[in-house]
Amino acid sequence: MGSLGPEHLSMKDQNALLFDSLPAYLPNIILPETYDLEALASDAVIRLENLEPSDLAEDVVWRDLCALTGTFRTFYGSINVHSVWKKLFRVHRPHLFKPVLGASEIFRAGKRSSWVQISYTFECRGNPETRCSGFIGLIPDLISSTWKIWLFTTLLEELKGFPSPDKPAFQPQANGLSDGSHASNRFTSGKIPNNLPHHLKKKESFDCVVVGAGFSGLAIAGRLHAMGISVLTVEKNPEVGDNWKNRYDSARCKYLETLQNVSLELTPTLAPVHTTKEFSEFPMARMFTNEDPKFPGRLDLIRAYRRYIAFHDINVWCSSCLKNASYDTSCRSWTLTIERQEQTTHVRTRHLVLAIGSHGSVPNMPKIPNRNLFKGEVLHSLHYKSADTWKGRAGLVVGSANTAHDVAEDMVDAGLSSVTLTQRNPTPVFPIEWYRELMDSRYHDNSDLEQADRRTISFPTAIARLINMEYYKGHMSRDPEKLRALERAGFAVEYSGDMVKCTFGDGAGGHHTDVGGGARIIKGEIKVKSGVIPTEFTETGLRFSDGSHQEADVVVFCTGFHTNMLPQAMKMLGPIMHDQLEDFWGIDEEGEIRGAFKRMKQEGIWFIGGGAPWARFGSRFLALQIQADLLGCPLQRYTADRREM
């Protein structure tokens, strides 16, 4: 019997197979610092105007971010890359290729790999006319004694003559909206001409409606508003930031703080995120202050959300839900039925962006037999707030990633009689010191956020994955005891350092950024059951796949969330749209994120989500695609020459 094809595998197994199949490598060469980088840059950039196969390394990788393909594509191998480049060159007629002076460098990935990396700009004379950028990776070819292009990217920066998605083109308002009241989008320059059908010029009509006022929704709404595009944001919660207000408290960050000028009935404990405030910033302007902690808490995040709304004067309808949406092909517009504060409102829009939460909205709750027998308390981490009421009881945490460690630490600090964490498989662990050493060099008080994103996120996924793994290996070689001690305490560690697979794999996580939980395990304050899965409840706890039994009074399932936004979207759009949309998150056969920030078969509808950097960076390309469509010159999507498994 033959093996099953990728389409018959689970989403998780499909992602693993796709990651491992991507044909990319890091060059095995250590370059000295003695090269004339400016001369190399000038020569390499000129080659792009008349690219020949001999200019390319055999295994070259080219990633385009909406510059020439109108979407997100990655091409592999010199023959395919050269062929596609020539086709798209004739269509878009790129010219004015120029190296960015002073930006060339020797890029080093670990101890064994390096290349000359060159930043450049260019323009396209197609429709629309655009400004673009990119970078080239050069390696020496020892056989021909020439430099080969091993890696390059092309990235859409802006449409010529129209507002950029990276800076406000208006005078920001003094006060924003946080109470759901309606106000018009106001700006002083850069408004796109209103060439929409007549019915879209009514009062309740917008160029774009964004559903969801979390980070992703606000990021795209802010960019669109800055570009002069009328946008409405619809939020189901009574106030923006309630998605954070309702998150669990954390005993790891017991500092008192008051939220000035905002009335919130919150406990003083705050749940910090596992990334720095610079890494978690909004686009275009910094919303975190010098007084905010390096790792923001819930209240810090809420405050930043509301500052962002005020800065951009974003139009938000709170306590509002999209009930259904229908598309009219004759006028290319959506009619939305929105339930707003218990009243039904109909809104028309050309574009509909769904930012409905891919990383924390729909819990993945295992169905374990005999739940009714258990005498204790059972909940998913979505509904977890605090362990303070469980003092003296036995706690059991199912899961081994970030949230599981947060909850287990809370249980210890709350005085539970015992705390046990269960682990199905070895877990990737990234000590916070290692993580910060990498990210703080790019995301800090003085960094250009937009450029930091380009440097971090515009790499082809396969290359970014290998770079991160090399970085991890370097730390392991210098400080192996950091993780060995954790493993000796019973916590199984996965040593690949594959953060990219964790980020884009099914579940968008499954790793542990160690900010202190590891030490609690090493000290024995948190016990670990590794290599097992729960098979059934009993009256007093859980039985596991190895036949063992764990007593518990309370069981918290930290088993993650469903990241695919498509099922949630279908509830709003109806089954007729299913085949016109894509699954959301994970990667496709080229290494690109599925369904995110790009046009699908159905025009005028978009998905946005993911962690802050990816939502922030992706929102700029989504905004540019919407802008081009509203101008009557939509980006031309190139869908041919797809890589096959």
Image: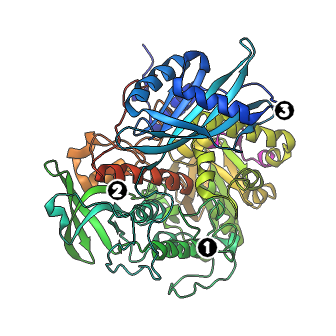
Closer to the camera: disc 2 or disc 3? 3
| Residue 76 image offset from top left, x and y in percent | 53, 24
Q: Quadrant of residue 222?
A: bottom left
> Would you name the residue on which mark 1 appears?
390
Q: What's the amino acid at mark 3?
A: Thr
Q: Quadrant of the N terminus?
A: top left
Q: Nearer the viewer, mark 3 or mark 1?
A: 3
Per the model, the C-alpha gap separating discs 3 and 1 is 63 Å
Give the residue pinned by disc 3.
34
Residue 119: tell me if it is visible: yes
Q: Are marks 3 and 1 in contact (CB under 8 Å)?
A: no
- Residue at point 56% right, 69% down? 248
Relative to residue 511, is residue 106 drawn left or right? right
For the record, the magenta segment spans 486-499
**Between 345 and 554, which is closer to the camera in this rendering?**
345
- Viewer-proximal residue, 6 or 168? 168
| Residue under numbered circle 2 | 353
Please state which of residues 132 and 254 is positioned toward the viewer in this rendering.
132
* In the image, residue 75 above or below residue 519: above
CA neighbours of label 3 inside 10 A, class few (<14), some (14 to 19), many (20+): few
The kind of residue on which mark 2 rests is: Val
